[in-house]
Image (spheres, helix red, strand yellow):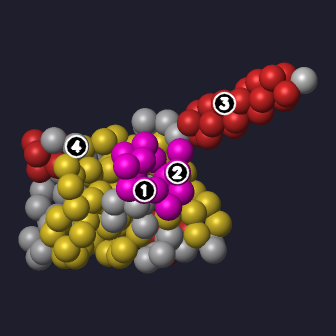
């Protein structure tokens, strides 16, 4: 009986773990806060070349889409809007997936640096104005596999 109960417990734990991992998809980032929850279909920029290119020259970005820039380790990060044609919200994240800052409606083509701070592990860019519309702000949390070593505030 004890073996059956242990086996059942393991199966339930595996099913819950599998369901949680199924919620984390490589092409989706989920955000939550006291404001609710939002999901974005994302592209990952995790190489120096991909991060340098970013969303430059994109003429549009679907409302539910974004780009997640991921660094090898937390570091000082700053963004600019050179050759970027659409206004963006730039969401700075630490290694645990905590939003540490949001720069709203970055101006297309502006060369002014947009500092994110010293411990930036990832940055999510979404359409300008969506952070305010949804309520995304410092203290919100993101769920994606890249934060699994964080330890994540909102694990997969």
Label 3 or label 1, whichever comes before in sequence order? 3
Residue 109 locus on image (x, y percent): 15, 65
Q: Is residue 114 left or right of residue 21?
A: left
- Rate crowding at label 2 as few (under 14), some (14 to 19) or many (20 or more) other CA atoms within 10 Å: some
Is label 2 or label 1 in front? Answer: 1
Q: Nearer the viewer, residue 3 or 155?
A: 3
Q: CA distance from mark 2 to mark 4?
A: 20 Å
Q: Is residue 91 left or right of residue 54?
A: right
Residue located at (78% from left, 29% from top): 6
Q: Helix, strand or loop at disc 3?
A: helix
Q: Helix, strand or loop at disc 4?
A: loop
Give above or below for 135 relative to 73. below
Q: Nearer the viewer, residue 57 or 23?
A: 23
Q: Which residues are magenta?
A: 142-156
Identify the residue under disc 2.
155
Instruction: Considering the whole magenta stretch, tell me its main secondary structure.
Output: loop
Position of the N terminus, as image quadrant, is: top right
Q: Is residue 37 left or right of residue 62?
A: right
Q: CA distance from mark 3 to mark 2?
A: 15 Å
Identify the residue under disc 3.
14
Could you tell me if the residues under marks 2 and 1 are in contact, i.e. CB atoms within 8 Å?
A: yes
Identify the residue under disc 1.
151
Q: How many marks?
A: 4
Q: Nearer the viewer, residue 46 or 80?
A: 46
Residue located at (70% from left, 35% from top): 13
Label 2 or label 4, whichever comes before in sequence order? 4
Whether residue 81 is visible: yes
């Amino acid at each position: 009986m004890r073996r059956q109960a242990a086996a059942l417990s393991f199966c339930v734990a595996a099913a819950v773990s599998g369901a949680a991992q199924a919620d984390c998809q490589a092409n989706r980032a989920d955000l939550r806060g006291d404001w609710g929850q939002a999901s974005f279909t994302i592209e990952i920029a995790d190489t120096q070349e991909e991060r340098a290119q970013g969303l430059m020259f994109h003429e549009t970005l679907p409302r539910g889409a974004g780009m997640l820039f991921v660094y090898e380790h937390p570091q000082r990060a700053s963004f600019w809007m050179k050759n970027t044609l659409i206004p963006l919200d730039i969401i700075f994240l630490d290694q645990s997936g905590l939003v540490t800052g949001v720069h709203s409606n970055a101006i297309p083509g502006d060369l002014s640096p947009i500092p994110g701070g010293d411990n930036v592990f990832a940055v999510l860019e979404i359409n300008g104005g969506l952070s305010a519309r949804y309520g995304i702000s410092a203290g919100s949390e993101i769920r994606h596999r890249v934060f699994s070593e964080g330890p994540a505030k909102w694990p997969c």
